[in-house]
Amino acid sequence: MEVQQYKFGPYKIDQKEVFYSTDLSYALVNLRPVNESHVLVCPRREVKRFVDLTAEETNDLWISAQKIGKQLENYHKASSLTFTIQDGPHAGQTVPHVHIHILPRKGGDFENNDEIYEAIDEKEKELKKTFDLDKERTDRSIDEMAQEAAEYRKLFF
C-alpha cells in the first residue's frame, strides 16, 4: 500500500491526522481547534489563494466540505455549521495554502455568534507564533489528533 504524502503549505502533515481524502482534496483534524470539532479541508495541490484553484479543485473542495460538515454535525449532535476561508495574509490566513475551516455549532457555543470568527483569527495568530518546523508540536499531541482522526475516518469508510 502506497503511503500518502500530505502538505499544508510548508508543513508536512502526518497521515494519521488526515481522516478524509479524494484525488483533489483532503481533510485533517486541527492542531489548535477553536471547538472540539474544528477541522480543515484543503486542496491536495499547494495553492495559496482561492482564485488560483482550478474549477475541478473548487468543486471537489466544496463537495468534500459539504460531506464532511454533514457527517460531523450529526456526529457531534450539532445544529449548524460554520464554514470559513481566510484568503490571503490580510484576511488572517497564516498558512499559505487554501483551507476551509469547518466548525459544527451548537446553540450558545459562543455568547455572540460572530465571536467564532475572532476565535479562529486568534488561533491562527497563535499558531503562526508557535509553529516551528524544527520543534516538536506543543499543542495537541499527534496521538490525540490521530485518535480524533480515526474516529472521524469511521464516518466515511
Image: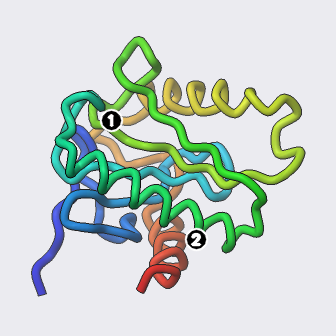
Q: Is residue 83 above or below residue 141?
A: above
Residue 145 versus residue 56: which sits nearer the camera?
56
Question: Residue type at mark 1?
Answer: Asp
Residue 47 versus residue 33: which sits nearer the camera?
47
Question: Residue type at mark 2?
Answer: Gln
User: Taking 2 as reference, is 68 left or right?
Assistant: right
Q: Which residue is mark 1?
A: 132
Q: Split into 4 quadrants, where in the image is the N terminus? A: bottom left
User: Taking 114 as reference, is 84 left or right?
Assistant: left
Q: Which residue is mark 2?
A: 71
Q: Position of residue 87 (x, y in %)?
A: 38, 25
Q: Are marks 2 and 1 in contact (CB under 8 Å)?
A: no
Q: Is residue 86 above or below residue 67?
A: above
Q: Split into 4 quadrants, where in the image is the C terminus? A: bottom left
Q: Position of residue 11 (x, y in %)?
A: 25, 44
Place residue 16 in its image quadrant.
Answer: bottom left
Q: Residue at 41% of width from left, 48% of height from top? A: 137
Q: Residue furthest left?
A: 2
Q: Residue at 89% of width from left, 45% of height from top? A: 108
SS type, badge 1: loop
